[in-house]
Amino acid sequence: MAFNDRNFRGNSNFSAPREMHKATCSDCNVETEVPFKPDPERPVYCRDCLPNHRTPRENRRY
């Protein structure tokens, strides 16, 4: 694998599958899966709705 391979994550377990959790999108109510355990107090968005709730990259704080 080349050092600059786009799929390289830089850790030793990059090939381990993520544990996915079922959730319902807070916007469109479609059932989706997320790579974290959803908190009932916070909204969860599907892949299609998430960009509508993200701050544009150039305005994000680091």
Image (cartoon, rainbow, N blue to C red):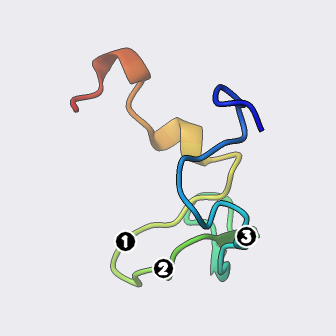
In the image, residue 11 lies at what x, y percent? 53, 56
Where, quadrant-wise, is the C terminus in this rendering?
Answer: top left
* Disc 1 from disc 2: Cα separation: 8 Å
Q: Is residue 40 left or right of residue 16?
A: left
Q: Amino acid at mark 3?
A: Thr
Return the residue at label 1: 42
Q: How many marks?
A: 3
- Bin the neighbour count of mark 3 within 10 Å (Cα to Cα): few under 14, some 14-19, many 20 and up: some
**Marking on residue 32:** 3
Q: 57 above or below 10?
A: above
In the image, residue 57 lies at what x, y percent? 41, 22
Q: Secondary structure at mark 3?
A: strand
Q: Quadrant of residue 27?
A: bottom right
Q: Is residue 19 left or right of residue 62?
A: right
Whichever of labels 3 and 1 marks the residue nearer the N terminus, that label is: 3
Where, quadrant-wise, is the N terminus in this rendering?
Answer: top right
In this rendered view, identify the residue nearer to me: 62 or 14: 14
Return the residue at label 2: 38
Q: 33 above or below 46?
A: below
Q: Furthest-top residue in view?
A: 58
- Bin the neighbour count of mark 1 within 10 Å (Cα to Cα): few under 14, some 14-19, many 20 and up: few
Q: Secondary structure at mark 1?
A: loop
In this rendered view, identify the residue nearer to me: 41 or 62: 62
